[in-house]
Amino acid sequence: MNEEIENFVEAEEEDRALFHLPVIWILILIFFGFLLLRLINLTVIKMPQYRLISEGNRLRTRFVPPPRGLIEDRFGATLVKNTPTFSLVLYPAELPFNKEERRAVLEKTKQDFGLPPEKLEPYFSFGKNLPQEVVLAENIDPEKYLFWKTSLTNDTAVDLVSSPRRSYETTGGLAHILGYLGKAGEEDLKKDPSISLASWLGKTGLEGKYDDWLKGQSGRSQMEVDAKGRAVRALAEVPPEPGKNLILNLDFRLQKIIFNALSEGMEKAQSKAATAVALDPRDGGVLALVSLPTFDNNLFFERENEALKKLLKDEREPLVNRVTSGLYPSGSTIKPLIAAAALEEGVISENTNFYAPAEIKVGDFVFPDWKEHGTVDVKKAISQSSNVFFYAVAGGYDRIRGLGINRLADYFQKFGLGKITGIDIGNEKEGLVPTPEWKKRVKKENWFLGDTYHLGIGQGDLLITPLQLANALTAIANGGELLKPEVLRRVEDNEGKVIWEIQKEVLRENFIQKKNIEVVREGMRETVLSGSARQLADLKIEVAGKTGTAQFPGSDKTHAWFAGFAPYNDPKMLLLVMVEGGGEGHSTAVPIFKKIIEEYLAVENSWLLSP
């Protein structure tokens, strides 16, 4: 019996062993299958990825900044160029991964170049969000570069690199036109991955507007490095593509003449600010633009600069371009626009005669003129600057029904007032053409006839920029085309090939008949021959224009205006001059205008004498 039991147990154990044997083999097969799949994954599927990682550890790629394009005037005078300088640059990603080796490189850099500890402290520890490059020192002149170059080792993480600095022409008050550069920000990096936080980009003026043309395309250099980040050999290089050059409508000779005459006139009038702008009535080209006080845009390249700090705190606000963003009442300089509107609407004709006393009364209100003019027509009203005539033309009086505020405001807007001109240096303000709706909304007051009268002589709540007024009067000079002002003339590559050329852009035309424009032009010519600007009558070239003297709130002073165009029969330039708080237009602005024209006529190949 016991023997049978033992045999049964042995049989059971044999069956159990036979049962477990396949399970063991299955587990062994699964294990080796897993190893095989893992091997395939590493050697086949992920091999390209690991190869890239390996290459990334072995290769270092840097972007090479391109030389920025030059800026020249229409005759080839260089206004902006690049001056050779160097920067000491740290490439954090190229520092050794080993903590001790990393610290050794940074400590040596700090000692060799006399850098403050805080400059390098953020890079002692390895991090994921380190910048591509860090400028440790910049604007290093060539002499210092040669001395520092000897301190560099074969460590690629720290290098002296060429970083040409913009050099702006400092004479002639060009800063508001040219603008300046600033360091790239995080948003800039998202748009262009080839730049870094150390890159300089255009921020204002032409530098900002045409930054895409000027900055060029970055190149790339690739080198092989060893495990410690030391350069072994250069592998490949893609040279940078230089920026394109800007050729402007500007005549730098005229710009300097205007700057000097305006500065002298401003000082004589004991004024704190003044503006002038010259436009070509044929195509809208900006021949010159001066806003005083001005500034030196070269200061923006210095990180620690007391002069720059002083500039930013200057209460005179020299950074403000008063030509494009200064807002002023126009005074009588706007009367030619009102005359054109009244002729076009049939409110008056060329032959309308009107007796202009020294003042008119409406109810209890008195609206004065600067003198009694007697009987005047529209030409004499322009040349003598009769306020009473333009009160009547604007709001109605006696036999003249007047334009009324709605038509008056409509024509101001047709001439481009109350909106930006679109000039390509930007930074414009729209100004204000007041209307009954505006007054009710903003001042909570009704519109009165007196408001229309004041608007008719360029006073009241009207606010315009000097550029707006100059551009509007250019439409009178050229026979009725309102043009977009353009500083840029064309874009060229380094070999002088034209890449892009600005075309004349007409903003509005045919809104005033040429016969009515001609009547206004004749009135502006009479201003010079026998009116408020007759001191210009002896110029060697025929000029037409209009003076203006504008009162402004909070002061008993007045802004002095004058705008004129020449030659009268074939206008090539409209020049507007305005001196803040400078007194009378005829006694302050007109002499400045005359000095500019006289000096510019003496220049060889003067634009005024061009065919």
Image (cartoon, grey):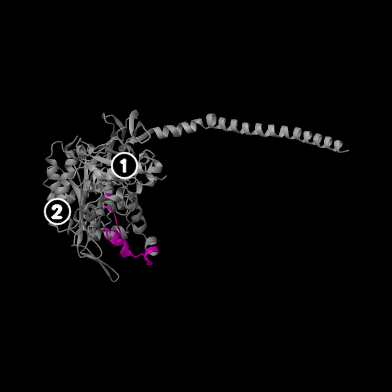
**Along the horizontal axis of the image, is 331 left or right of 19?**
left
Whether 268 is among the magenta residues is no
Q: Confirm whether residue 358 shows in the render.
A: yes
Residue under pointer 2: 265
- Which label's residue is closer to the chain start, 1 or 2? 1
Secondary-structure class at tag 1: helix
Q: Of the residues shown, which amino acid type is indicated by label 1? A: Val
- The residue furthest right is 1
| Front-most of residues 216 and 106 | 106
- The residue furthest front is 2
**Along the horizontal axis of the image, is 10 left or right of 233?**
right
Residue 457: quadrant of the picture = bottom left
Residue occupying the point 30% across, 65% down: 450
Q: Of the residues shown, which amino acid type is indicated by label 2? A: Gly
Q: Which mark is residue 105?
A: 1
Q: Which residues are magenta?
A: 441-467
Relative to 233, does residue 404 appear above or below in the rendering? below
How many marks the image carries: the answer is 2
Q: Residues within 10 Å of mark 2 (few under 14, many from 20)?
A: many
Secondary-structure class at tag 2: helix
